[in-house]
Image (cartoon, rainbow, N blue to C red):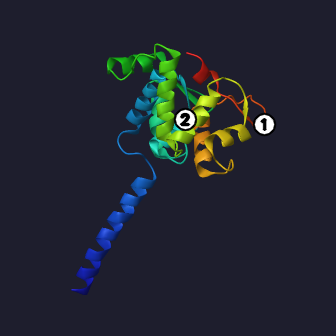
Amino acid sequence: MGKTTATKKDAPAKGKATQAKKKKGGGGGDTKDVILNYMAQMHSLGISEVTEAALLKETNYAGTDSKGFRNPMKELTKGLGYITKEAKTYSLSDDGRQHLMEQGKLASPPATLEEKQAHQRELLGKMCKTPVAKLDAVWAILLDGKPHTTAELLTASGYKGADSSGYKSMMKEMKALNFLDESTGKGKVKFSDKVLKL
């Protein structure tokens, strides 16, 4: 009786451990589809290049050495040829765009710059943990296309410092989406052409 009881108690614990492991690595569903759907979404926003960091976050993997990410990406790049990779940036190939169009998953790019920016702002809001009013304040300032100091953005958003979690989250996601101009000098923040141009 004692052995039987111990076995029954052990089984649920093993199940919980397995569920926890699955939750920690991998976003569920078919990873290839998750990647392609995300690439299609970015393409519809006029974003042709997607960073490795953004794809890892979308698929819920910690790094590219995870088999759950590495193997599907290898198939998409080298096997099917739907995605091209350069350094840590990924883009849809002609075959990839054709495949997504045939599946009805590739929407037409925005017709106007304002429409594109509205979609980008909506996407950023979903990705970061910044309150809407604070995010809108920073977004509005950066839309002028000029470099702004961190102090300016902190004042506009009401954050006390650049180490505030909401401010850090906003900057991190903007960078992951390639919304920021990396050539801007230290202490300055400026939107990239991915936001400023159609």
Query: x, y (%) of residue 80?
Result: 43, 25
Q: Residue furthest right?
A: 185
Which quadrant holds residue 9? bottom left
Neighbor class of circle 2 (other Cα within 10 Å; few <14, some 14-19, many 20+) is some
Up-down relation of residue 57 to residue 17 (above or below) = above
- Give the mark nearest the N terminus, 2 or 1: 2
Neighbor class of circle 1 (other Cα within 10 Å; few <14, some 14-19, many 20+) is few
Is 124 in front, or is 158? 158
Say whether residue 10 is left or right of residue 186: left
Q: Residue furthest bottom?
A: 2
Q: Residue at x 71, y 37 (%)?
A: 152
Q: Residue at x 33, y 17 (%)?
A: 102
Q: Residue furthest left?
A: 1
Which quadrant holds residue 89? top right
Quarter the N terminus occupies: bottom left
C-alpha distance separating marks 2 and 1 = 23 Å
Is 133 in front, or is 79? 133
Q: Residue at x 51, y 28 (%)?
A: 120
Residue located beneath label 1 in the image: 186
Up-down relation of residue 3 to residue 154 (above or below) = below
Say whether residue 179 is visible: no
Residue located beneath label 2 in the image: 136
Tally of marks:
2
Query: x, y (%) of residue 98?
Result: 40, 16
Which quadrant holds residue 99? top left
Quarter the C terminus occupies: top right
- SS for callout 1: loop
Say whether residue 124 is left or right of residue 2: right
Say whether residue 30 is left or right of residue 198: left
Q: Are marks 2 and 1 in contact (CB under 8 Å)?
A: no
Q: Amino acid at mark 1?
A: Lys
Query: x, y (%) of residue 13?
Result: 34, 70
